[in-house]
Image (cartoon, rainbow, N blue to C red):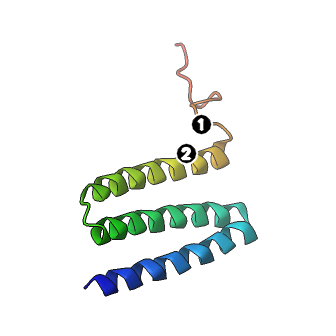
């Protein structure tokens, strides 16, 4: 059983290297954002597998926290790319005085 998880960890490591190639190759900014998000997801999988291999279940808590940070970070990057602002910014975000 451990050999299966070790093989899965090796496959994820190879996939992470391929995603890093996509990250640096581009060609567009959105390809790079997708690569960063995919790398984060694979990191969550790797943390979970390593937690199983080392028999430390608290790694799953760390993996869940990393998944949340990855999600929020991706949303923040995409919002910044769309609006060039992370806050409400501009007239559209302000309430108008009546």
The residues tagged by marks 2 and 1 sit, at their Cα atoms, a distance apart of: 7 Å
| Total number of numbered discs in the rendering | 2
Q: Quadrant of residue 63?
A: bottom left
Q: Please give the residue where the numbered disc 1 appears in the rendered image.
A: 86
Q: Estimate the x, y position of residue 28 in percent, counting from the top left.
A: 73, 66
Q: Estimate the x, y position of residue 53 in percent, counting from the top left.
A: 31, 72
Q: Please give the residue where the numbered disc 2 appears in the rendered image.
A: 76
Q: Residues within 10 Å of mark 2 (few under 14, many from 20)?
A: some
Q: Is residue 18 above or below residue 62?
A: below
Residue most toward the top?
98
Left or right, 11 with reference to 27: left
Q: Earlier in the sequence, mark 2 or mark 1?
A: 2
Q: Residues within 10 Å of mark 1 (few under 14, many from 20)?
A: few
Q: Nearer the viewer, residue 6 or 88?
A: 6
Quadrant containing the N terminus is: bottom left
Q: Nearer the viewer, residue 86 or 3?
A: 3
Find out whether the residues at labels 2 and 1 contact each other: C-beta distance under 8 Å. yes
Q: Estimate the x, y position of residue 69 in percent, counting from the top left.
A: 44, 48
Q: Quadrant of residue 88?
A: top right
Asked whether the viewer can see residue 26, the reply is no
Kindly identify the residue that appears in the image at 64 percent across and 36 percent down.
85
Kindly identify the residue that appears in the image at 35 percent across and 52 percent down.
62
Give SS at disc 1.
loop
Q: Is residue 97 above or below residue 19?
A: above
Left or right, 52 with reference to 38: left
Kindly identify the residue that appears in the image at 25 percent across and 66 percent down.
55
Q: Estimate the x, y position of residue 38 in percent, counting from the top left.
A: 52, 67
């Amino acid at each position: 059983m451990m050999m299966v998880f070790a093989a899965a960890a090796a496959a994820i490591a190879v996939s992470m290297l391929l995603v890093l190639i996509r990250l640096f190759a581009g060609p567009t900014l959105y390809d790079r954002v997708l690569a960063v998000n995919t790398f984060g997801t694979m990191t969550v999988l790797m943390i979970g597998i390593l937690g199983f291999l080392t028999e430390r279940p608290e790694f799953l808590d760390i993996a869940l926290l990393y998944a949340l940070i990855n999600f929020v970070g991706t949303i923040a990057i995409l919002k910044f790319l769309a609006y060039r602002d992370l806050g409400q910014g501009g007239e559209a975000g302000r309430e108008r005085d009546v």
